[in-house]
Image (spheres, coloured by chain):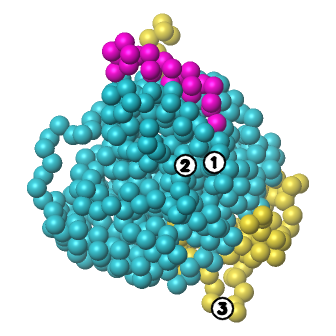
Chain colours: A cyan, B yellow
Amino acid sequence: MSDLTWLTLPELGRLLRERKVSSVELAEHFLGRLERLGPAYNAVVTVLRESAIAEARLCDADLASGKDRGPLHGIPYGAKDLIAAEGAPTTWGAQPYRNQMLKGDASVVRRLREAGAVLCAKLAMVELAGGMGYNQAFASFTGPGRSPWDTARWSGGSSSGSGSAVGAGLVPFAIGSETWGSIQYPAAFCGVTGLRPTYGRVSRHGAMALSWTMDKLGPLARTVEDCGTVLAAIAGPDPADPSALDRRFTYPPGAKSRKRYRLGILKGTLEKTQPEVRRNFEESLRVLREFADVEEELELPDYPYEAMASIVIDAEAASAFEPLFESGRITELTAPEDRIGGYAGQVVLAKDYIRALRLRRPAAAALDRLLARVDAVAAPTLPTVAWPIDAAFDKVYPDYSGGANISGPANLCGVPGVFLMNGTGEGGLPTSLQLTGRALGEDSLLAIGHRYQQRTKFHRLLPPGL
Amino acid sequence: MSEMNRREFAEALALAALAPMLGTGAGPIRWPSALAAGAPAAGLAAPEPSVLAKALAGAIRAQYGDRLSEADLAVVTRQIENGLERADKIRKATLTNGDEPDFVFSAIRSESAG
C-alpha cells in the first residue's frame, strides 16, 4: 500500500470500500505516526491506541457485513483535548486538569463514532483555550505547539494540536474549537483547511466552555471537501445543548453549485500585511475571479466589536472558571501571564456584560446586511506567516498587524468561515485565504473553497521533510 | 523556547496591561487599533488608573490578595481599567429599552416532574 498519510477522506474511503486497506490498518498507520512524530510538534496529549483499535475492528466487521456508516466509516481522527471522550483524560491543556476524567462522550464524539470515525488521539491545545490571555506559545503543559512547516514556528492556537496533527499527517482530520481565532490561526500556521461553523451548528455539549455564547466546534482537514464531510457528520440539533440549532447540514449539498458567485473585499484588508501575503491573496483573487464577481471596498458596520467580544469572553470565562480561581490552582497554569490574566474578568460589571449582549443583536443584524450582498467576504486569513515560537505575541511582526479584519466581528456574531492555504511566504511558510459568509452560509463558503482548491494545488503541498 | 525569563515576563505583563485586547481569551488575534488605543506614547508613563478601577481592584485584593503580589495587583488594576475603557466604548452605541440580550433560556416543564 502506498503512503496513506496524505490522502483525503474520499480517497481513504475508496480504499476501505475496495478492501485495499482495513480500518485497523488505517488506525495502526496513524497511531504509529501520532506516537512517533507527535512529540516533535507537541501535538498530542493522549494516544488512544487500545480504544482506537477496538473501534476500528468494529468498523471492519460492520463493513464486511454490509453496514456502511458513510464517508467517515473507518477513518481515524483526533479531537482537541477540551472535548470529552469517555475513558480518556480531558485536560483542557491545563496542569490543574491534567488528570481530569469526565463521564460520557461529548456530543461531537458520539456523532463521529456513529458515523464510523475512529478517535485515535486527544490533541494538544493552549491551556483553557487561551481564556486567560496568553501572550506566548509556551502556554500549555504539553509545551508550545510547533508548526509542521518549521518547528521553530508556532502552530497557532488555541487548537494547536488539531492544526499541527493534520498538517504533519498524524491524522486525516481533527476537531478544534474557536471562540476568537482558535481554528483560524492553526489552519493558517499549519497550512491546512479549517472550518469555523455558524454558532450553534455543532453541539458544544461535552466541550469545555470558555464562552457559552461564542464557542464553536469545527473541523481541520486536508481539503474543503473533507471539512464539509466532517461538518455534515457533527452538525445538527442536540437536546443537551440549548444553543444547538434545529438544522441538519448535508454535504455535498443537494442543490447544484452555481456557475458564478459574488465575493466581497473589505476596504483596507491588505494594509499592513507581509508582501508575500498580499501577493498570494491577489493571486487567489485572480483564481477566484474565474468563477466569481468581486465587489471591492466593502466596509464593516461601525460597532466596537473587539470591545464587545472582550467583555463577553472575559465575563463568561470568569464564571466558567470560577472554581479554578476559588481553589487557587490558577497559579499552576504554564504561562505566567495566564496565572493573573483572568482576575480582571472577575469584576466585569453585570451591566456592561449585558450591554455587550444587547449590542450584539444590532451588530449581528448589520453584519448580516453586509454579508447578504455577497456569497463570501475574502481576505488573507492572517497578515503574516507563522510566528517565531520564542516571540511574545505583542512584539512579533510589529509592522504587519493587518488591515480591516472580519474575523473578530465574525466570531462575535457567530458567522462561519473557511480557511485554506493559498501559497507560501517568508521562509517557505504557508499563507492562507479566508472566506466569511452569512450565518448558515457554509454551503456557499465550501463551494467557493472547493472550486478554488480544484484550480490550485496548495492543499496538496507538504511540509518540508514530511 | 523553554520559558520567558523574568525580565521578558515583566515586559510582557506590562504590555499586556496596556493593551486592551490582551487579557481576553482564545486565539491571539491582535487588533492594531485596540493595541494602539491602550498604549501611551513612547516615553510616557501609563496614566493613573481611575477611582473605579482601583475600587474594583480592591474587590480582587479582598478575595484573592493572599496570592497576588503588589506587582500582580498593579497589572490586574491596569487590566480592569482597560476593561472599563472597553465598556465606555460600547456605551457610546445607542440602545433602546426594548433591545434585549440574546440569552438562551426557556422555561422548563420536565415530563418526569409530575
- Camera-side residue: A133 or A228? A228
What chain is tagged by disc 1? A
Query: Type of residue at label 3?
Result: Ala
Q: Residue at x 62, y 81 (%)?
A: B39
The residue beneath circle 3 is: B42
The residue beneath circle 1 is: A38
The residue beneath circle 2 is: A165
On the picture, is A463 further left or further right than A128? Answer: left
Distance, label 1 to label 2, CA atoms, is 7 Å
- Camera-side residue: A402 or A2? A2
Query: Type of residue at label 1?
Result: Gly
What chain is tagged by disc 3? B
- For residue A118, which numbered disc appears in the image? none
Answer yes or no: do the residues labelled 1 and 2 have beta carbons within 8 Å?
yes
Residue extending farthest to the right is: B66
Label 1 element class? helix
Q: Are marks 3 and 1 on the same chain?
A: no
Q: Residues within 10 Å of mark 3 (few under 14, many from 20)?
A: few
Q: Residue at x 46, y 27 (%)?
A: A23
* Residue A79 in view here: yes
Label 3 element class? loop
Q: Position of residue B41 (x, y in %)?
A: 62, 90
Q: Nearer the viewer, mark 3 or mark 1?
A: 1
Q: Position of residue A11 (x, y in %)?
A: 34, 40
Is A388 in the magenta? no
- Camera-side residue: B108 or A30? A30
Q: Residue at x 41, y 50 (%)?
A: A222
Distance, label 3 to label 1, CA atoms, is 43 Å
Q: In the figure, A283 relative to A22: above or below?
A: below
Residue extending farthest to the front is: A1
Between discs 1 and 2, the one toward the N terminus = 1
Give, as a single range, the part of the protein colored magenta. Answer: A47-68
